[in-house]
Image (tube, grey):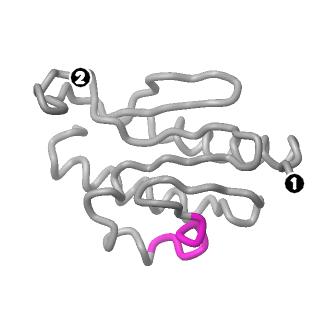
Amino acid sequence: MPLATETKTVIFDLLKRVMEDYCPPLVVKKKSKDAIEVIGNVPTPYGYKKVIVPGMYFASALIRKDNVSFYFFPIYGAPKEFEKLAPIAMKCLDGKTCFHFKKEEQAVEQEIRALFNQGIAVYKKQGWVK
């Protein structure tokens, strides 16, 4: 059953607000009515050819038909550092970096902010955020 538009909007608006609150140090790369993407603020070599990108991908949120997808890249390299920070959100983790929120109570602002705080700390260690 498709998720109600109202529910998707509430979840997306929460994620968008949190992402924007962390800019700076993060930078909004893309933003539309149903998507947002944030990146680090340090130009970084990326990929096989080490092409310099304006900032390392950090997170994005997208409104989909059946959920709101929240992609959170810092968790990829250090999953254990994030497990205890967001026990409710972690139940929605599908794969290594993607959370699929289908209910408002799954996207807890305190947990999302804790993920962002830890993610920024991880990115600072890597030199991807000043």
State the image coordinates of residue 3 (x, y, percent, origin top left): 83, 50
45 and 113: which is toward the camera: 45
Q: Is residue 91 magenta?
A: yes
Q: Which residues are magenta?
A: 85-92
61 and 85: which is toward the camera: 61
**Residue 101 placement: quadrant:** bottom right
Q: Residue at x 41, y 59 (%)?
A: 96
Of the residues shown, which amino acid type is indicated by label 2?
Val
SS at badge 1? loop
Of the residues shown, which amino acid type is indicated by label 1?
Met
Q: Which residue is mark 2?
A: 53
Is residue 103 shown above or below 24?
below
Q: Locate the N terminus by quadrant.
A: bottom right
Q: Which residue is mark 1?
A: 1
Is residue 74 left or right of 13 when viewed as pictured? Answer: left
Is residue 105 left or right of 48 when viewed as pictured? Answer: right
Q: Nearer the viewer, mark 1 or mark 2?
A: 1
Q: Is residue 114 magenta?
A: no
Q: CA distance from mark 1 to mark 2?
A: 39 Å
Q: Residue at x 62, y 55 (%)?
A: 100
